[in-house]
Each structure stands twice: as structure tokens, then as C-alpha cells.
Amino acid sequence: MVNLTGTQTSDWRSDGSLAYGLFRCTFGLNIMMRGIVRIALGLPAFQNYMLTQFKDVPVMPPAFLVPFASALPFVETLIGLCILVGFQTRAALIAGSLMITALTFGTMLRQDFTIAWLQLDYAIAFFILIALRSWNLISVDAMMRKGSTGTAAAPARIA
């Protein structure tokens, strides 16, 4: 594989692969924990929070908000877990990008521009992880590729 600078990135021990793996894990943990905490605190609490946030937004009906608020924590948990371990990384990152797009849409309807800037940070993180996916060599995806094609470098043994 060749990274953006033209140097080889086929070694899982490279700085690029290590940096990508650490950032991907941290970002995945962040997304996953958002969902887990919302589930642990109870879906009704999150549903009520969403209804309160959108009470003054006439174009966002409660009939849409309650199902969205019910599904979102599970979607966040699944997407975050996949990103955390690097399983189906591309699909998880695309799904996460679409999720943050939907959240940004709602935030802009509420005219909460401070939160919208924070969501833009998430969108940039998704962009970076998608654009630099060739460095995704410390992941379940890379282990699965190695098992099926023998192309990924095997981890070194630690004595």
C-alpha cells in the first residue's frame, strides 16, 4: 500500500499505522460510549431530552423524534464498536458520517451553532479516518485480510 506521501504503509508497525490505529480506537470508543451511556441511563431519559431540545422547532415532529432517539444510542454503540476494533471499518465510517450529518441537520434546525461546530469536528474526524484508511493495518479488517489472502503483515512476537 502507498500512503499520501508515496511511502509504503504495508507494515503494521509503521508510525502511520500506529497513529491511525490509536486515533481510530479513541474515536471509536468516544462514539461507542455515547451510545452505551444513553442506553444505561435509560431510553426514556434520552427521548425526553430530545423532545425538550426540539420543543420550539415546529418542523421536527415528536412522532419522528421518539423513534430516532430510540434507535440512535444503539446505532452509536454499533458504529463505535466497529470503529474501535476496526471491523468493517469503511462501512462503519461511512455510516458514522451519515449519522453525524443527520445530527447536524437537527442541530441546525434548532439553531444551536455552538454544537454544530462540535459536530463539524466529528465530521472532520470521520473524513480523516476514511481518507487515511490505507493505514488501517492494526485492525480486525487487516487480520481478516491476512487470513484470506496472506497479504497483511503478521504481528511480531513479543518475547
Image (cartoon, rainbow, N blue to C red):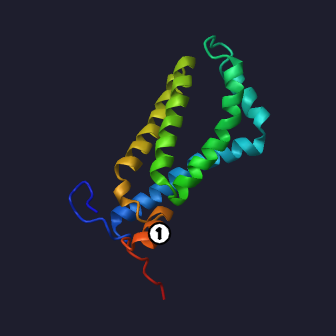
Q: Position of residue 72 (x, y in %)?
A: 64, 37
Residue 156 left/right relative to 81: left
Q: Is residue 49 visible?
A: yes
In the structure shown, which secondary structural element does the residue marked by tag 1 occupy?
helix
Residue at the extreme bottom: 159
Residue 95 vs residue 50, the one in the foreground: 95
Label 1: how many residues lie within 10 Å, few (<14), some (14-19) or many (20+)? many
Quarter location, residue 154:
bottom left
Which amino acid type is shown beneath numbered disc 1? Answer: Met
Q: Position of residue 46 (x, y in %)?
A: 72, 33
Q: Is residue 28 above or below residue 145?
A: above
Identified at 52% across, 53% down, the residue is: 83
Q: Position of residue 49 (x, y in %)?
A: 71, 28
Q: Which residue is mark 1?
A: 143
Identified at 68% across, 32% down, the residue is: 69
Residue 19 vs residue 44, the one in the foreground: 44
Work out which quarter of the rendered image holds the N terminus and state it. bottom left
Q: Position of residue 51 (x, y in %)?
A: 71, 22
Residue 53 left/right relative to 112: right
Identified at 35% across, 48% down, the residue is: 131
Residue at the extreme top: 58
Identified at 43% across, 66% down, the residue is: 145
Q: Is residue 52 visible?
A: no
